[in-house]
Each structure stands twice: as structure tokens, then as C-alpha cells.
Image: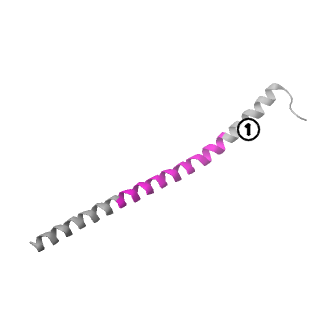
Amino acid sequence: MAITSERGKRKSVDLELSATHTVWWLLMPKGYFVLLQLNKQIKLAMRTLLLFNASASLSQSLLNEAEASSKS
């Protein structure tokens, strides 16, 4: 027998929303933490790249200085 009263319909909608909310809470943190981990990995890669570029430019300037001092 189907529930046709307004109260019954509201209860059904509340249960559906509650189930959706529960599923969202179960799934959301996992996706959120995956995004956080990706963000950390990207930041780490950018820092590594910046350090590599800085060390390469430092090496190049030291090499230029060594060449300049050997010529004089």
C-alpha cells in the first residue's frame, strides 16, 4: 500500500536526502584528500624544478666566472 499523506511524502524525501547526504559524506573526503595530495605533489614538483633551475643558473655563473678568470 502506497503512502499518500503529505507527512509520508515528506518523510520519504527526508530519507532520500539523508541517504544522499550520507553517500556524499562518505565519498567527499576521499576525493578531497586525493586533490590535496595532488596539490602537494604539484607544489613539490614546482619547488624541485625551481631549485634545479636555480642550481643550474648558479653553476652556469660559476662556470662563466671560472672561464673569465682563466682568460685573464
Task: Looking at the picture, tell me which residue is in the foreground, 56 or 11.
Answer: 56
Task: Looking at the picture, tell me which residue is in the foreground, 53 or 8.
Answer: 53
Quarter of the image that includes the C terminus = bottom left
- Relative side of 45 to 18, left or right: left
Quarter residue 2 falls in = top right
The structure residue drawn at horizontal position 59% and vertical position 46%, both measured from the top left corner, is 28
- Relative side of 47 to 30, left or right: left
In the rendered view, tell whether residue 65 sits above or below residue 10: below
Mark 1 is surrounded, within 10 Å at the Cα level, by few (under 14), some (14 to 19) or many (20 or more) other residues, namely: few
- Relative side of 55 to 16, left or right: left
Residue tagged by mark 1? Answer: 16
Looking at this rendering, what residue extends furthest in the top direction? Answer: 6
Does residue 60 belong to the magenta stretch?
A: no
Quarter of the image that includes the N terminus = top right
Task: Looking at the picture, tell me which residue is in the foreground, 48 or 11.
Answer: 48
Report the magenta residues as a range. 21-49
Count the labels in the image: 1
Residue 19 image position (x, y, % from top left): 70, 41
Quarter residue 49 falls in = bottom left
